[in-house]
Image (cartoon, rainbow, N blue to C red):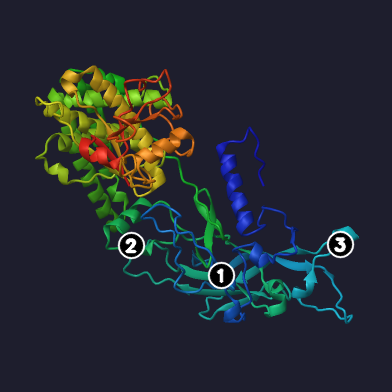
């Protein structure tokens, strides 16, 4: 197992965690852990390890399942979790039984006649000092085996693992009858092999003529003994199959025969990532060497390597937020952004040239995807042309770039924030629908799909900033609340994820408010604010007043926090979303007074923060003032 030091990389840590999980749930295996391990005497291996073992095929049904599965907790706390969140773990409709066999199915070509099957597992023997009964007789069951007292100088009882490994040559006979092969001598384990020719006429499977499907199972045929149950189990069972001629990739029948667009799309996405085996009661893994697979194996805890997704930058495209935020000429903005649309158009053209390389079924899916991509290109081009016209759209775009840049500089301490290509494209193609309330594109729901950490949040926050600013610019009016009201509602299903996004969204609103203060003649006198509407478990519903004796009001939570009776922040933020300083006792203020408050004012205590003193953080965290003030940005679960 890999050692973790201060010089370890993230890859090392990931591998360490993966190996630790396998050792904890399955036990020692191929190149992992101590093959001669010893376990404490007081826990049987079948309790110590949760999976990876095979019980005898003749085990009575009432003894073939987890005996602890029906255990009930005597006490269930009613207040676990948050209101509206269920903490009940429902039992499975059927009892889960331990397997007595597991195996692999795969494809081989017509010339493959032999397979080499490696079977590995571990047997556990109980090494114990038997305690003599008063009658002088000893019991030979596991229940009578006790741990000796080390202080008496006697050996300590334990479970001793005995590693087993056998190579079984399998000669295929093309018979429709199952083949049986003993694994070693008197081990009680046996291989069952089934093969048949694949009939694929009329289907676009691309299989060579004479391809055969083979299934290899390892079965525990040991005699079950209730008093010696774990001694009859085979633990950490591994099955590895090698074919000198290599294995034939398994076609995705679900994708080939699918009618649902999502399944057909998935089939095309993974067309160049074939599967070489499937597991039964277990998962499968394989190795590729120069695109050829000649070795497959079982995996109780499967793992897959996911390639890192990176964005592409195109020459001539301006991605700098500060630069885009300073451009006032529509012709210049077109010049800076048009290469992005042109590069996308070229990518689509290249894709159409590759359609002939696909099977007829996949060709239709590919053509449809490229048509949708072309629609996105047209929307992207329309967004650029809309900016080129100048006016309120260009101004809102400029302000959005500046405030996102300012928020990123504050949070990440970067000098010159830049958009990633997909972020900028996402914003541009949505501009026509955001700017024109009559646009048919308002019926479109765009899914921004990218791995964690890739920049999805900044992309939609940039679009949110545009929406809020554009509303102010196009609805100036005469009153203080002109253009105000809720512009953006952000909802999440996971409470912890909501709170993470809350801090980042609040940082954007802080930057927006600083921008508004600098230009009230354009952005109005009513502040940009973010409202936290996440339920009374996260934020108070009521302000409260003196004498109401309620424990869930903003007044009670603030007073408890100020007095030290509670260490929990009255709102689901522990630090300033702008400067990062921790909230203190003087952060929260009940206004206009503590006895009959109507609002909660939040001020950072960091003297270097811009939201201190008379400038409070633009956060509305109580339901009552939210309904009254209607903050521009509303975040909720």
Q: Are marks 1 and 3 in contact (CB under 8 Å)?
A: no
Image spot of residue 224 (x, y percent): 67, 79
Q: Are marks 2 and 1 in contact (CB under 8 Å)?
A: no
Task: Name the residue that disc number 1 marks.
Answer: 71
Is the residue 492 above or below the residue 95 in the image? above
Label 1: element kind: loop
**Which residue occupies the foreground of this view, 16 or 74?**
74
Query: Which of pointers 2 and 1 indicates the residue nearer the eye?
Result: 1
Q: Residue 593: which quarter of the image?
A: top left
Mark 3 vs 2, N-terminal side: 3
**Residue 367 as seen in the image, left or right of residue 613:** left
Q: Residue 382: which quarter of the image?
A: top left
Label 3: element kind: loop
Label 1 – label 3 distance at C-alpha: 34 Å
Residue 185 disc label: none
Query: Which of pointers 3 and 2 indicates the residue nearer the eye?
Result: 3
Residue 256 disc label: 2
Task: Name the residue that disc number 3 marks.
Answer: 155
Is the residue 192 above or below the residue 500 in the image? below
Label 3 – label 2 distance at C-alpha: 63 Å
Image spot of residue 567 (x, y percent): 48, 38
Mark 2 vs 1, N-terminal side: 1
Query: In this rendering, does residue 265 appear at all?
Result: yes
**Residue 33 as seen in the image, left or right of residue 412:** right
**Residue 265 as seen in the image, left or right of residue 574:** left
Image spot of residue 440 (x, y percent): 12, 43
């Amino acid at each position: 197992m890999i050692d973790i030091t201060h010089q370890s990389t993230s890859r090392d840590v990931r591998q360490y965690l993966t190996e630790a999980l396998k050792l904890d749930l399955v036990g020692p295996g191929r190149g992992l852990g101590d093959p001669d391990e010893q376990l404490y005497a007081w826990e049987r291996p079948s309790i110590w390890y949760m999976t990876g073992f095979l019980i005898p095929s003749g085990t009575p049904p009432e003894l073939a399942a987890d005996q602890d599965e029906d255990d009930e907790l005597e006490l269930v706390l009613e207040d676990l979790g948050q209101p509206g969140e269920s903490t009940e773990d429902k039992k499975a409709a059927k009892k889960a039984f331990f397997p007595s066999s597991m195996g692999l199915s795969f494809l081989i070509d017509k010339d493959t006649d032999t397979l080499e099957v490696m079977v590995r597992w571990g047997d556990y023997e109980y090494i114990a000092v038997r305690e003599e009964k008063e009658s002088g007789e000893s019991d030979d069951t596991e229940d009578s085996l006790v741990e000796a007292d080390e202080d008496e100088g006697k050996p300590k009882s334990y479970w001793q693992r005995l590693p087993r490994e056998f190579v079984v040559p399998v000669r295929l006979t093309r018979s429709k009858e199952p083949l049986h092969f003993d694994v070693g001598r008197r081990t009680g384990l046996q291989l069952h092999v089934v093969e048949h020719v694949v009939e694929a006429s009329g289907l676009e499977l691309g299989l060579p003529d004479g391809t055969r499907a083979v299934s290899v199972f390892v079965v525990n045929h040991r005699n079950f003994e209730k008093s010696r149950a774990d001694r009859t189990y085979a633990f950490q069972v591994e099955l590895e199959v090698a074919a000198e001629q290599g294995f034939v990739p398994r076609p995705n029948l679900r994708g080939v025969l699918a009618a649902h667009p999502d399944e057909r799309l998935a089939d095309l996405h993974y067309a160049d990532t074939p599967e070489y085996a499937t597991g039964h009661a277990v998962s499968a893994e394989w190795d590729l060497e120069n695109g050829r697979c000649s070795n497959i194996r079982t995996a109780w805890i499967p793992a897959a390597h996911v390639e890192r997704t990176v964005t592409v930058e195109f020459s001539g495209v301006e991605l700098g937020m500060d630069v885009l935020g300073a451009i006032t000429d529509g012709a210049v903005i077109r010049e800076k952004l048009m290469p992005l649309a042109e590069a996308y158009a070229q990518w689509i053209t290249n894709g159409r040239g590759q359609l002939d390389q696909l099977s007829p079924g996949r060709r239709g899916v590919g053509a449809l995807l490229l048509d949708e991509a072309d629609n996105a290109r047209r929307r992207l081009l329309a967004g650029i042309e809309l900016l080129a016209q100048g006016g309120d759209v260009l101004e809102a775009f400029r302000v959005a770039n500046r405030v996102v840049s300012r928020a990123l500089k504050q949070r990440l301490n970067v000098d010159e924030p830049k958009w990633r290509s997909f972020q900028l494209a996402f914003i541009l193609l949505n501009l026509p629908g955001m700017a024109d309330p009559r646009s048919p594109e308002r019926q479109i729901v765009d899914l921004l799909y990218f791995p964690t950490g890739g920049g999805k949040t900044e992309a939609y926050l940039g679009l949110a900033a545009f929406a809020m600013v554009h509303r102010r610019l196009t609805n100036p009016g005469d009153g203080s609340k002109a253009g105000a009201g809720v512009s953006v509602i952000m909802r999440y299903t996971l409470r912890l994820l909501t709170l993470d996004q809350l801090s980042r969204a609040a940082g954007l609103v802080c930057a927006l408010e600083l921008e508004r203060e600098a230009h009230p003649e354009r952005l109005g006198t009513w502040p940009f604010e973010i409202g936290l509407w996440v339920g009374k478990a996260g934020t108070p519903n009521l302000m409260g007043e003196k004498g109401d004796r309620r424990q869930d009001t903003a007044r009670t939570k603030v007073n408890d926090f100020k007095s030290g009776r509670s260490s929990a922040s009255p709102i689901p933020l522990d630090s300033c979303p702008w400067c990062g300083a921790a909230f203190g006792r003087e952060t929260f203020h009940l206004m206009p007074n503590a006895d009959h408050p109507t609002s909660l004012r939040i001020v950072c205590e960091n003297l270097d923060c811009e939201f201190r003193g008379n400038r409070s953080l633009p956060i509305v965290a109580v339901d009552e003032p939210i309904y009254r003030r209607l903050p521009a940005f509303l975040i909720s679960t």
